[in-house]
Image (cartoon, helix red, strand yellow):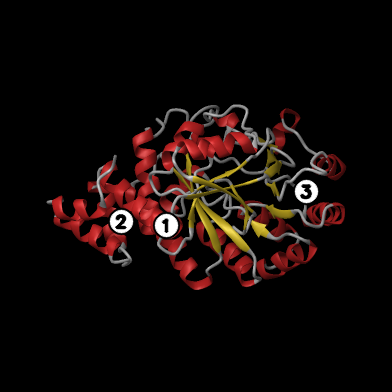
C-alpha cells in the first residue's frame, strides 16, 4: 500500500519534492520547472501518492467508461509519420482499405437497439475523402440515429479537409458542427515541440495548428480530448512543453474533457529500433500528468493500447477513466503491437476490471454525464 500524502511530506528529504508535495496538498499549481523536477527526481511511489491524492480528491473511487464503437473510414494516408504502423501511403493504397458511406452506415446500423452512446470516427487522410464526403456521412448517421454522439476526426484530418476545401479553421469547424459533429478526439497531437515533431511527423499539421483547431472547436461549444505520444525519442523537457501548451489552452477555453497519454509502440513502423517504455515509466508518466494538468477534469488510460491489466494498475496512479467497450473495430493500435490484439470488452468485463481495482465503475456519456453506477 502506498503511504499517505502527509507521511510523504513529513519523510521526504528532497526539499524540491517536499515543496511539490505540499503544493499538491494545498491545491496549488506546480510550475513547469517543478514538473521537470518530478520527471527527473520523483520515483514511482512518490509520484503515485501525489497523483492518487488528486484523483481521489476530484473523483473519489469513481472510474468512468462509456459504450462506444469505432469507425475507421480508411487507412490510406497522404502522410508518412515515422511511428505509424497503421496507414498506407496513397501510392500503396492497394494494401489499405477504403469504406464507402453506405458501408460505414451499415456499421452504425449493426448497433441499432444496443445501448451505445458514441461513435468515434478517425482514420487516415485520404485525398478523395473530402469535407463534403464527411458532411454527408455525419448527416446520414444523425438522420438514422439522432441520439448517437458523433466524436470524429483528428486535427490532422481536419487540417487537410479545411485546406483542401479552402476554408478557414473557423469556417470548417462551423460547417462540420452544423452537420452534426459534436466533439473531437485528441489524436494527432503527438509531441508539439518542433524539434521532435520535425523528426517523427514533419509533413502533417504543426503543434500550433493542432491547438488552433481545438480552440476553435471549444469556441463553438464543442468539447475535445487531448493526447500525447510518449516513450520514443522525446526528452522530459518536450513532455513538459507539450503539457504546458495544453494547460494554457485549457485555462483559456475550459474545452478539454480528458488527457490521454498514448504509449509509443514499435511494431511494424519506421521507429522499430526505438525501445518501448517500461510499465514503471508508463505509470510515472500518468501520475505526473495528473499532478501537472490541474485544470483537466479527467485522465484516461486507453486500455486497448496499454493492456487490460496495466490500465487497471493505472487507476492507482491518477487515472479515472479507461475509455469504452470499443468493440473489435479499431486496428490503429493492434497493428502497432499493442497488448490488445482483439480490443473488445463487454460492459460486464469492464465493470469487473474496475471493481477488482477497488474502484466504482460509472458508465458515462461522451461529456461525462453519469448514466449508470455499478455499486
Residue 233 visible in the snapshot: yes
Residue 307, visible in the rendered structure: no
Mark 3, residue position: 129
- The residue that disc 1 covers is 243
Residue 35's disc number: 2
Mark 2 residue crowding within 10 angstroms, few (<14) / some (14–19) / many (20+) = many
Residue 278: image location, x then y, percent? 37, 33
Image quarter (top left, top right, bottom left or bottom right) of the N terminus:
top left
* Residue count near mark 1 (Cα–Cα under 10 Å), binned few <14, some 14–19, many ≥20: many
Q: Quadrant of residue 346?
A: top right
Which comes before the other along the chain, label 1 or label 3? 3
Crowd around label 3: few <14 · some 14–19 · many ≥20 (10 Å): some
Which residue: 72% across, 68% down? Answer: 174
| Front residue (pair 54, 44) | 54
Is the Cβ of the residue at disc 2 closer than 8 Å to that at disc 3?
Answer: no
Tell whether label 2 touches label 1 (CB within 8 Å): yes
Quote the CA–CA distance across marks 2 and 3: 41 Å
Q: Position of residue 303 (x, y in %)?
A: 53, 38
- At horizontal 71% and vertical 41% (from top left) the residue drawn is 72
Amino acid at each position: 500500500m502506498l503511504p499517505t500524502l502527509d507521511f510523504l511530506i513529513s519523510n521526504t528529504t528532497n526539499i524540491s519534492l517536499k515543496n511539490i508535495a505540499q503544493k499538491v496538498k494545498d491545491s496549488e499549481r506546480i510550475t513547469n520547472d517543478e514538473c521537470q523536477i518530478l520527471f527527473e527526481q520523483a520515483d514511482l511511489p512518490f509520484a503515485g501518492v501525489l497523483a492518487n491524492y488528486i484523483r481521489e480528491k476530484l473523483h473519489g473511487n469513481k472510474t468512468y467508461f462509456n459504450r462506444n464503437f469505432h469507425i475507421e473510414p480508411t487507412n490510406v494516408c497522404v502522410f508518412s509519420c515515422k511511428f505509424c504502423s497503421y496507414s498506407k501511403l496513397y501510392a500503396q493504397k492497394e494494401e489499405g482499405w477504403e469504406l464507402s458511406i453506405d458501408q460505414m452506415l451499415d456499421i452504425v446500423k449493426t448497433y441499432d437497439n444496443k445501448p451505445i452512446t458514441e461513435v468515434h470516427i478517425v482514420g487516415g487522410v485520404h485525398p478523395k475523402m473530402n469535407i463534403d464526403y464527411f458532411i454527408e456521412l455525419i448527416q446520414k448517421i444523425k438522420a438514422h440515429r439522432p441520439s448517437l454522439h458523433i466524436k470524429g476526426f483528428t486535427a490532422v484530418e481536419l487540417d487537410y479537409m479545411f485546406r483542401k476545401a479552402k476554408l478557414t479553421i473557423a469556417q470548417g469547424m462551423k460547417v462540420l458542427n452544423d452537420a452534426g459533429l459534436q466533439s473531437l478526439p485528441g489524436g494527432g497531437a503527438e509531441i508539439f515541440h518542433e524539434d521532435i515533431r520535425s523528426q517523427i511527423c514533419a509533413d502533417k499539421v504543426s503543434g500550433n495548428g493542432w491547438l488552433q483547431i481545438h480552440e476553435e472547436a471549444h469556441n463553438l461549444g464543442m468539447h475535445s480530448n487531448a493526447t500525447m505520444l510518449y516513450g520514443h525519442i522525446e526528452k522530459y523537457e518536450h513532455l513538459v512543453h507539450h503539457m504546458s501548451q495544453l494547460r494554457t489552452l485549457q485555462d483559456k477555453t475550459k474545452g478539454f474533457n480528458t488527457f490521454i497519454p498514448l504509449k509509443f509502440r514499435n511494431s511494424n513502423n519506421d521507429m522499430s529500433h526505438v525501445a518501448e517504455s517500461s510499465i514503471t515509466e508508463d505509470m510515472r508518466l500518468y501520475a505526473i500528468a495528473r499532478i501537472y494538468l490541474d485544470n483537466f477534469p479527467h485522465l484516461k488510460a486507453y486500455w486497448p493500447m496499454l493492456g487490460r491489466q496495466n490500465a487497471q494498475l493505472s487507476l492507482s496512479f491518477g487515472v479515472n477513466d479507461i475509455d469504452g467497450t470499443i468493440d473489435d473495430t479499431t486496428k490503429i493500435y493492434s497493428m502497432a503491437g499493442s497488448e490488445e490484439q482483439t480490443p473488445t470488452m463487454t460492459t460486464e468485463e469492464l465493470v469487473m476490471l474496475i471493481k477488482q481495482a477497488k474502484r466504482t465503475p460509472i458508465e458515462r456519456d461522451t461529456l461525462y454525464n453519469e448514466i449508470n453506477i455499478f455499486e
